[in-house]
Amino acid sequence: MELHRLGIKFFVADPTSINLEDFIPLFHGWIQGQALKGHLLIDVHDYSHMQNGPGILLVAHEGNLSIDMSDGRPGLYYYRKAPTPLSAVGHMATVFKTGLDACRLLEKEAKLQFKMDEFLVIANDRLEAPNTEETLVELQTALTAALQEVFGPLNFKLTRDARDPKERLTVLVRT
């Protein structure tokens, strides 16, 4: 499976600590300093007017970051758009590391805390990765290997969100 449109969302530990407008100047500062390694940071979009929407979006050539408000669970969502010249496990690990790096920057600069015991992995390609149990089974070995490469030798419980098979494949990861 050639899956490169992949994302990860880390939930904020205290959802009441989020003030979306605070992220606009912060993300502009990231653009000025090109703060995210391996990414050409380009622009900031304000979607704070959308209920349960993408919040504040930082656009990069390689992928996008947002302070995502979907499903009423605020968090940092990193979505990789561009393929990497790596194996499936290596590509997934790169996505997870980038999301984790962005979390660390936000913890330092915005004084946020993120939950690391529960997060989402989202395949943003319905054709390549339909939201089926078969797709999860096919991805499970590579996904677990990439998670262990980034987070260490933990036991991961992977649960597919099966509420709507027309939605993107979304896997809840718990440690």
Image: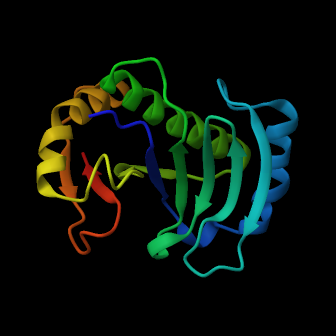
Q: Nearer the viewer, residue 129 or 35?
A: 129
Is 144 placed above or below 9 here?
Answer: above
Q: Nearer the viewer, residue 7 or 147?
A: 7
What is the quadrant of residue 4 in the picture?
Answer: top left
Is 8 placed above or below 54 here?
Answer: above
Residue 54's x, y, as percent? 60, 66
Q: Residue at x 65, y 45 (%)?
A: 106
What is the quadrant of residue 156 in the picture?
Answer: top left
Q: Nearer the viewer, residue 173 or 80?
A: 80
**In screen coordinates, is 21 left or right of 2?**
right
What is the quadrant of residue 63 in the picture?
Answer: top right
**In screen coordinates, is 47 left or right of 88?**
right
Q: Residue at x 34, y 19 (%)?
A: 87
Residue 128's x, y, as percent? 31, 46
Residue 35's x, y, as percent? 75, 31
- Number of callouts in the render? 0
The image quadrant where one finds the N terminus is top left
Residue 85's x, y, as percent? 46, 17
Figure coloring: rainbow
Is 169 placed above or below 15 here?
Answer: above
The image quadrant where one finds the C terminus is top left
